[in-house]
Image (cartoon, rainbow, N blue to C red):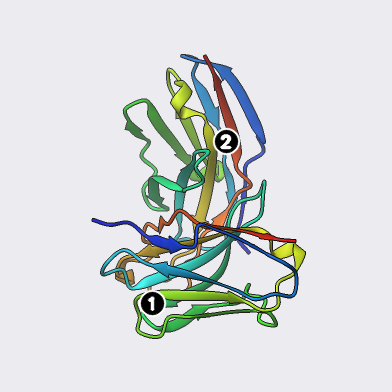
Amino acid sequence: EAGVAQSPRYKIIEKRQSVAFWCNPISGHATLYWYQQILGQGPKLLIQFQNNGVVDDSQLPKDRFSAERLKGVDSTLKIQPAKLEDSAVYLCASSSNRLAGGETQYFGPGTRLLVL
Amino acid sequence: AQKVTQAQTEISVVEKEDVTLDCVYETRDTTYYLFWYKQPPSGELVFLIRRNSFDEQNEISGRYSWNFQKSTSSFNFTITASQVVDSAVYFCALSEAQYSGGGADGLTFGKGTHLIIQP
């Protein structure tokens, strides 16, 4: 079974530019998450999707970050315009049907973003 | 609000020693899930274990074991006979799952413990 796929793996941009990250979850996984991991810290949830609907975006800086999962499969996270403090690893995770709650989340390899 | 504390920032041991990584959590929910993930230098988070709040049985998987104690809100992780390949950052995480369906269950992570196994 293929894991969570993310691209690109690395991205370097200048501040005020825009950037987009792509994630394809494990096949059949209804729930998709985006996390931000700043160097030396644990990941922090940005947004959670259930199919193509947003479940939780309370920690997403909505003035510059946006995310979508239009067809309920793959997802895109965008930053516009980027700031220096957005330098981090962006992790995508997915989990299976949520009837049981607290399902295990499986993570992709992440996208390392450096904002200069 | 939920919180996970991993007080040990870095631990360094010699190969074959046993090592315990501490995790203390805070939650007001009675139903929750606890997780441990491993993050090797490659950066990908690798799932190790999931435990729900109603199951306090300790678990052993090879050289790994976990001790869940609700009385002290702790979920500690022990590696027996450590090996160099165990070197990584280990994260403890908490999810306040919603049984109503469609609820938010994003993970709250601790800051991680960097484990260094010296040959």
Tell me if residue A76 can be seen: yes
Chain bearing mark 1: B
Displayed quadrant of residue A86: bottom right
Task: Report whether mark 1 lies on the same chain as mark 2.
Answer: yes
The quadrant in which the C terminus of chain A is found is bottom right
Which residue is rendered at x = 60% and y = 43% of the image? B112
Nearest to viewer (mark 1 / mark 2): 2
Task: Give the image location of residue B115, x and y in percent.
Answer: 57, 30
Q: Residues within 10 Å of mark 2 (few under 14, many from 20)?
A: some
Tell me if residue B103 can be seen: no
Q: Which mark is residue B22?
A: 2
Callout 2: SS: loop
Q: What is the C-alpha distance between the residues marked 1 and 2?
A: 31 Å
Q: Residues within 10 Å of mark 1 (few under 14, many from 20)?
A: few
**Nearer to me, A73 or B82:** A73
Task: Give the image location of residue B13, x and y in percent.
Answer: 58, 18
Which amino acid, mark 1? Ser
What residue is shown with label 1? B100
Q: Is residue B23 above or below residue B14?
A: below
Task: Give the image location of residue B9, x and y in percent.
Answer: 67, 36
Which residue is rendered at x = 55% and y = 63% of the image? A35
Q: Is residue B83 above or below residue B111?
A: above
Which residue is rendered at x = 51% and y = 67% of the image? A34
Which amino acid, mark 2? Asp
Displayed quadrant of residue A45: bottom right
